[in-house]
Image (spheres, rainbow, N blue to C red):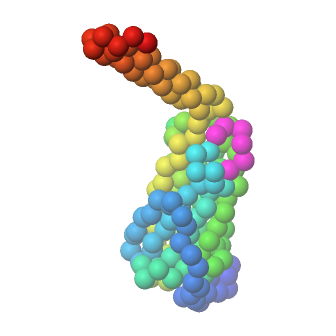
Amino acid sequence: MLVFFAMALVASNARAFADPLNNAFRQRIGNYDVQMTTEPKNPTVGSPSSILIRIAGVNGDDLVDVPITLRLVKDGIEVSRITQVVPYGHYVHEYTFTQSGRYVVYLDVNDLSYTGQTLTFTFFVNVAGAFDYLYIAALSAGVATAAIAGAMIFIKRKKQAHGIKS
């Protein structure tokens, strides 16, 4: 076990360069700059999703072989936990959400290189229910219909005021 931590300590000083994550949330604690995003951007219940993590130094270079624990929590209850050594600064956690609502992603980074402490990064993921987008589409269609009807009434009254027949 001691050998594993010694290897992780040496390896975590290694550097790799890769692209930052697009449309990601970012937090900086100490010497770490962590990004998190999901794919798809708006996860829905019952569909597989990916939680993408990038761990970099404050100067932008990806850190290699960083030990982490990723915890996924909903309503104060842990629904997923994975402990992993992140190679080359990037990690993808596959997960299928079973309930809609707000989830919290806690990323515990074991800071073996600098402080010897565990740093916790906190991110939020909003998961839509299967019919949530249907409600939004129906509401948008209703608003659009009302706007068109209102415009038609306005135009008709304008024409009548100017004595134009339609």
Above/below status of 84 relative to 8: above
Q: Quadrant of residue 138?
A: top right
Specify the segment rendered in magenta: 44-49
- For the N terminus, the image quarter is bottom right
Which residue extends farthest left?
Answer: 161
Nearer to us in this view, 135 or 53:
135
Instruction: Check residue 48 for magenta coloring.
Output: yes
Taking the spot 62% from the left edge, 45% from the top edge, the residue there is: 43
**9 sits left or right of 160 in the view:** right
Taking the spot 45% from the left edge, 63% from the top edge, the residue there is: 26
Residue 160 visible in the displayed image: yes
Q: Position of residue 56 (x, y in %)?
A: 51, 76
Above/below status of 107 relative to 158: below
Q: Where is residue 29 in the image (x, y as percent from the top left)?
A: 40, 69
Above/below status of 101 relative to 125: above
Nearer to us in this view, 53 or 42:
42
Residue 81 visible in the displayed image: no
Q: Where is residue 107 in the image (x, y as percent from the top left)?
A: 53, 61
Instruction: Check residue 152 for magenta coloring.
Output: no
Taking the spot 66% from the left edge, 63% from the top edge, the residue there is: 92
Q: Is the magenta stretch mostly helix, strand or loop?
A: loop
Which residue extends farthest front?
Answer: 164
**115 sits left or right of 71 in the view:** left
Q: Position of residue 75 (x, y in %)?
A: 52, 37
Count of residue discs: 0
Q: In which quarter of the image is residue 157?
A: top left
Taking the spot 30% from the left edge, 10% from the top edge, the residue there is: 163
Q: Quadrant of residue 91?
A: bottom right
Nearer to us in this view, 17 or 4:
17
